[in-house]
Amino acid sequence: MDPIRIDDPQDPRVAAYLDIRERDLAGRQGRFVAEGKVVLDMLLSTGRFAAESVLVLENRLAGLDEILRRAPVDLPVYVTAGEIMDRIAGFHMHRGILAIGRKGVAQPAEALLGALPAHALIVVLVGIANHDNMGSVFRNAAAFGADAVFLDATCCDPLYRKAIRVSVGAALKVPFASFTDAVGFIATLDRQGFDQLALSPRGQTEIRDAKRTERLALYLGTEGEGLPENLLARLRTLRIGMAEGFDSLNVAAASAIALHRFSAGRR
């Protein structure tokens, strides 16, 4: 592919990259921004989402040869100088690598459940509204081999730019789907043979004592409030033992401990 030179920040070909932070808040009508070399590699190599274009600093292009070979031959690759890129983005882009991806049609939770293997480990998120936490949970899910992540309607978007960046591209790799009725989702997982464990500081069982089953769902809630009481009442609960006088962890840290505990030996 031949790089396309951009010398005007108002060039309509790069309109999707204008004022990135403001667009983060306003939404991109089915698009998302991938930022950085590792995330671009994930976008182009996994094939889960289509790339629409790439915008790169001129001095970073040579280092992307191998990654861009995975791109469709007709993918526009725009190249520009640092000053122009900063004016396009609306702030200093020290990474110098951006791409626009398309979300496509959201996969229904039922369809994703139906595609899971017989031996499955999934993460169920309820009320996770912080993009750093969302990205970290996805990174942990990828690192420890979770098969999918399911999110209730109150969770933030895993394809928000910051969430993708914090996940180091894992949000573009780990399959995910949303559901609206948490109680109904519990019933669905029960019918599909999932053992369902909820992480809570008041959990009945210490996580070291919990046994892994063939199909396992790990529930995580927002920091502070945790999982809603009506869900905790329907699930087996686990706690992560801690030093006396301290009873809570960041949800990202808790997800890492739990996923490591139940993914041991899964390769």
Image (spheres, rainbow, N blue to C red):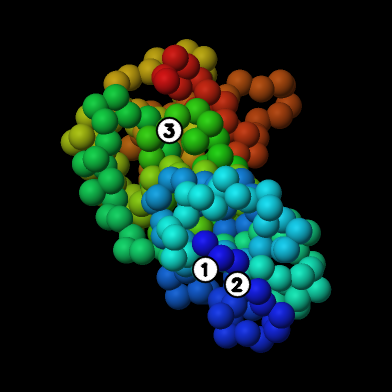
- What amino acid is found at the position of numbered circle 2 in the picture? Ile
* Nearer the observer, 19 or 24: 19
On the image, the x and y values in percent for residue 2 come to: 56, 65
- The secondary element bearing badge 3 is classed as loop
Residue beneath disc 2: 4
Identity, as a three-letter code, of the amino acid under mark 3 = Ala
Residue 22 appears left or right of 48: right
Q: Quadrant of residue 30?
A: bottom left
Secondary structure beneath label 1: loop
Q: Give the residue type that dot 1 points to.
A: Pro
Q: CA distance from mark 3 to mark 2?
A: 39 Å
The circle drawn on residue 146 is 3
Q: CA distance from mark 1 to mark 2?
A: 7 Å
Quadrant location, the C terminus? top left
- Disc ID at residue 76: 1
Q: Relative to residue 49, is residue 193 depicted above or below?
A: above
